[in-house]
Image (cartoon, rainbow, N blue to C red):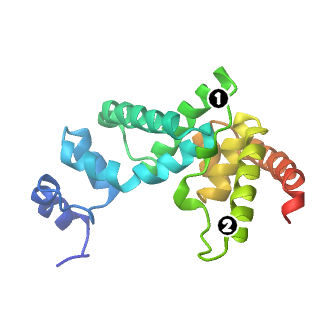
Amino acid sequence: MPGNGDDQSDGGNAGDIADGTAEDVPDRLLAVRAGEGDEGAFEVLVRRHGPELLRLATRMLASTTEAEDAVQEAFVSAWRSLPEFRGDAAFLTWMYRIVTNRCLNQLRSRRPVTHLDAVPEHETPGHEGSPVRDAEAGAALRELSRALEGLSPEQRACWLLREMHGLSYEEIADTVGISPQAVRGRMFRARRALMEAMAAWR
């Protein structure tokens, strides 16, 4: 009977993963099977979490092309590391850490150029029949993108993980590799800087 525990799921979904119908299998089980070499299980994880990770990387790097490369490289790294993945954190939290660290390393090595594709098109609020409101919304999003560019890489990572992806301070600390107190300090400075930059839009 569905929903009666992991034991029955562990035994009953091997075929489902192989034939691509495992969308309801928990991440933990998929990660375990992927760590054993099950490519089908890993493909489900990529489909499930790839879009969210791409949004994070795009906001971090201000470039869709670079973000796609970063997420692809992160998944390759995760595939290689899965045999050692013990499930101490959720799979998505683990992937946030890999993607964030890859983006931070890239940001620290150079100052990226702000691109208008920093905000994916599907995130621009739509107001059919209102070109003025569309233009205003687009301008506000571009201004936010520029304001994020002005933050330090660590401040940007903390703000995005908190405000756009809903992670707790403890999860952000684990992802970025700093203390929760340091996360709070970076969040305070990031929010203050963004409020000043976006004052005209309030």
Q: Position of residue 164 (x, y in %)?
A: 62, 57
The type of residue carrying mark 1 is: Leu
In the image, residue 89 above or below residue 110: below
Residue 90 visible in the current orientation? no
At 53% from the left edge and 31% from the top edge, which residue is drawn? 102
Could you tell whether 108 is left or right of 79 in the image? right
Q: Position of residue 38 (x, y in %)?
A: 18, 43
Q: What is the distance, in whole Å, between disc 1 and disc 2 at their CAs? A: 31 Å
Q: Nearer the viewer, residue 180 or 24?
A: 24
Q: Nearer the viewer, residue 125 or 39?
A: 125
Marking on residue 134: 2
Label 2, residues with CA under 10 Å away: few <14, some 14-19, many ≥20: some
The type of residue carrying mark 2 is: Asp
At 34% from the left edge and 48% from the top edge, which residue is drawn? 46
Identify the residue under disc 1.
Answer: 107
Q: Nearer the viewer, mark 1 or mark 2?
A: 2
Q: Quadrant of residue 173?
A: top right
Residue 179 visible in the current orientation? yes
Marking on residue 90: none
Q: Position of residue 27 (x, y in %)?
A: 34, 55
Q: Quadrant of the N terminus?
A: bottom left
Q: Earlier in the sequence, mark 1 or mark 2?
A: 1
In the image, residue 149 above or below residue 139: above
Label 1, residues with CA under 10 Å away: few <14, some 14-19, many ≥20: some
Q: Position of residue 84 (x, y in %)?
A: 34, 34
At 86% from the left edge and 47% from the top edge, which residue is drawn? 193
